[in-house]
Image (tube, grey):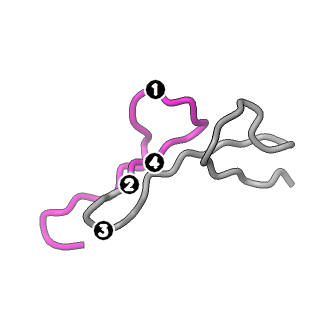
Amino acid sequence: MVQGDTELDDNGTGVKSCIGHISGNETLGVPSICMGDGPAGVGNSLNNVTTFQHL
């Protein structure tokens, strides 16, 4: 990061079909993250999401 850059927005943005959404930073090469969760993985037919294993 360089002076004047802001921290990544980790509070979510707008209404998404994701369970959690984190905006990326194109300047830093950080992609947006769309997260889904659940005991059997994503249950809402989303594509290209990050799913965390249920323990």
**Residue with the mark numbered 2:** 24
**Residue with the mark numbered 3:** 28
Check if mark 1's residue and mark 3's residue have beta carbons within 8 Å. Answer: no
Crowdedness near tag 1: few (<14), some (14–19) or many (≥20) residues, C-alpha within 10 Å: few
Q: Relative to 25, does residue 16 appear above or below in the rendering?
A: above
CA distance separating discs 1 and 3: 24 Å
Q: Is residue 13 left or right of residue 53?
A: left
- The residue sitting at the front extreme is 47
Task: Assign a secondary structure to mark 4.
Answer: strand
The chief SS type of the magenta part is: loop
Q: Is residue 2 left or right of residue 23?
A: left
The magenta region covers 1-23
Name the quadrant of the C terminus.
bottom right
Report if residue 5 lies within the magenta region: yes
Labels 2 and 1: the sequence-earlier one: 1
Labels 1 and 3: the sequence-earlier one: 1
Crowdedness near tag 3: few (<14), some (14–19) or many (≥20) residues, C-alpha within 10 Å: few
Check if mark 4's residue and mark 2's residue have beta carbons within 8 Å. Answer: yes
Q: Amino acid at mark 3?
A: Leu
Q: Residue at x 86, y 43 (%)?
A: 40
Q: Residue at x 46, y 26 (%)?
A: 15
Crowdedness near tag 4: few (<14), some (14–19) or many (≥20) residues, C-alpha within 10 Å: some
Please state which of residues 30 and 20 is positioned toward the viewer in this rendering. 30
Labels 4 and 3: the sequence-earlier one: 4
Q: Residue at x 74, y 40 (%)?
A: 42
**Residue with the mark numbered 4:** 22
Q: Is residue 27 left or right of residue 17?
A: left
**Residue with the mark numbered 1:** 15
Please state which of residues 24 and 54 is positioned toward the viewer in this rendering. 24
Task: Assign a secondary structure to mark 1.
Answer: loop
CA distance separating discs 4 and 1: 12 Å
